[in-house]
Amino acid sequence: MSVPAVVIAAPASGSGKTTLATGLIGALRRAGHVVAPFKVGPDYIDPGYHGLAAGRPGRNLDPVLVGAERVVPLYQHGTRGCDLAVVEGVMGLFDGRIDENHAGPVAEGSTAQVASLLGAPVILVVDARGHSQSLAALLHGFATFDSGIRLGGVILNRVGSERHDQVLRAACARVGLPVLGSLPRMAELEVPSRHLGLIPAVEHGTAATAAVAAMTDLVAAHVDLAAIAALARSTVAGPAWDPSEAVAPSTSDGRGADPHVPVSQPASSDGPVIAMAGGPAFTFGYAEHRELLSAAGARVATFDPLHDELPSGTAGLVLPGGFPEEHAADLAANSRLLKSVRELAGLGLPMHAECAGLLYLTRSLDGHPMAGVLDVDAEFGPRLTLGYRDAVALVDSVLWRAGERVRGHEFHRTRLISTGTDAAAWGWHGSRGERVREGALVGNVHASYLHTHPVGNPTATARFVAAADDFASARVAG
């Protein structure tokens, strides 16, 4: 039997989903529930606040990056040991990947698709500012647009007065939707943001903890927690996702076992050490990445490039996404680490760098010296680059074989200001049909702006650990 869930959605972005979902997770936990927190889509920031509220890692459910068939197994995996799940949606309820060729009832990657896959009810969060009786028409549209989606109720957000609340409740009653909560306007709850959204909880520190506590207090005071717990359900069944099974070698493609994927535990003692960058500058990552690395036989050691050195015995380096442009001066000041990374890249250390990791490996970022592994410079740019990409690996690497197709996501405001001479990692077609070549390959270094989800590409993780094991064995032998 699956753990019951509610999906927190909205008519549009900016309605207050994150505040409500985070506060709801915290309030339900305070009421005695063990809550599993999820976020629809590739968002890395909101799960950080969810994790603070739940006391356990926030996880993502993204049908585009991992495949719709993996959403339920990931849900089962993330809800182990819990009695309730809260799933925060993305954008508006029916918003998802923009694809003119998509003929399905709901957009791929939308909150509606995930709610349908989970068989869970949707609670619609409505920004009440500017709404009066016409709210009934809006709710009627969302309730009847897709018969496969069940609206379980409404939470009114940013209500201006008691009279305003009465009018809005009457509008909800007109279309038969219960009001599960009504939150007053609370400007002091606004969490500081920057060019890519909210400031990550790791960077916001004690202020993030205080904000989560305030959200929890607000929801506990103005939302009917018992009604929401009673509403929650999920109709899914089946086994949970298993990282060990995901990285196990497969010959189902008829081509025989991949020689770059280990068929047993790594040869090096206790498995190779994979250093994973963390701290304020490298906050973008998925909980399943560490789980897959460990399942493939690696020992994962987190370090902070702002002030740490590489962990002892490092045989592979993962540099995830984040905000290095906000910390460029401090990253540059840790010159000893930059030198180590540059030297180890020259010795063949396997490196997987995404977005922030790419920037860290450039010659310079906004004029600050970086590791210089890649023949390129970077700077903060004038516009945001955002969207899903259908990419193909252009050459073999420690992660992918040439010709393999991957779905990824770009999300950055920086840009490369010289093309460099390194081989490109990815190719895809742009929105106007133009050919795009992106990323860089240098030896065993794979660097790109493209964010990928390891669950959608588990073989790549297994290959990376195998390459790290080879590097560790060679160092011992040599």
Image (cartoon, rainbow, N blue to C red):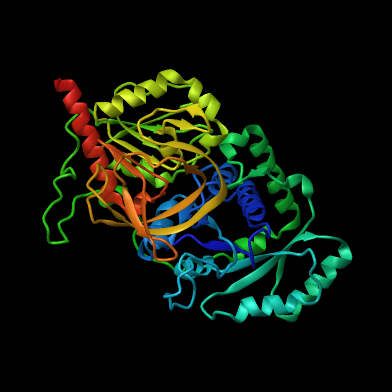
Q: Nearer the viewer, residue 345 or 212?
A: 345
Q: Residue at x 57, y 74 (%)?
A: 150
How many numbered badges does the structure rendering display?
Answer: 0
Q: Residue at x 17, y 26 (%)?
A: 474
Q: Tell me which corner region of the image, top left, top right, bottom left or bottom right, holds residue 266.
A: top left
Q: Position of residue 90 (x, y in %)?
A: 56, 60
Q: Nearer the viewer, residue 394 or 169?
A: 394
Q: Is residue 166 above or below residue 354?
A: below
Q: Position of residue 9 (x, y in %)?
A: 60, 64
- Point out the image quarter for the C terminus: top left
Q: Position of residue 453 (x, y in %)?
A: 39, 51
Q: Is residue 466 left or right of residue 78?
A: left
- Point out the image quarter for the N terminus: bottom left
Q: Nearer the viewer, residue 110 or 122?
A: 110
Q: Is residue 140 left or right of residue 467?
A: right
In this orientation, does residue 102 appear?
yes
Q: Tell me which corner region of the image, top left, top right, bottom left or bottom right, holds residue 149.
A: bottom right
Q: Residue at x 53, y 56 (%)?
A: 84
Q: Nearer the viewer, residue 66 or 230?
A: 66
Q: Position of residue 306 (x, y in %)?
A: 50, 25
Most extreme residue toward the top, as rendered? 336
Q: Tell me which corner region of the image, top left, top right, bottom left or bottom right, holds residue 153.
A: bottom right
Q: Is residue 322 above or below residue 240?
A: above
Q: Is residue 9 above or below residue 399?
A: below
In this orientation, does residue 242 appear?
no
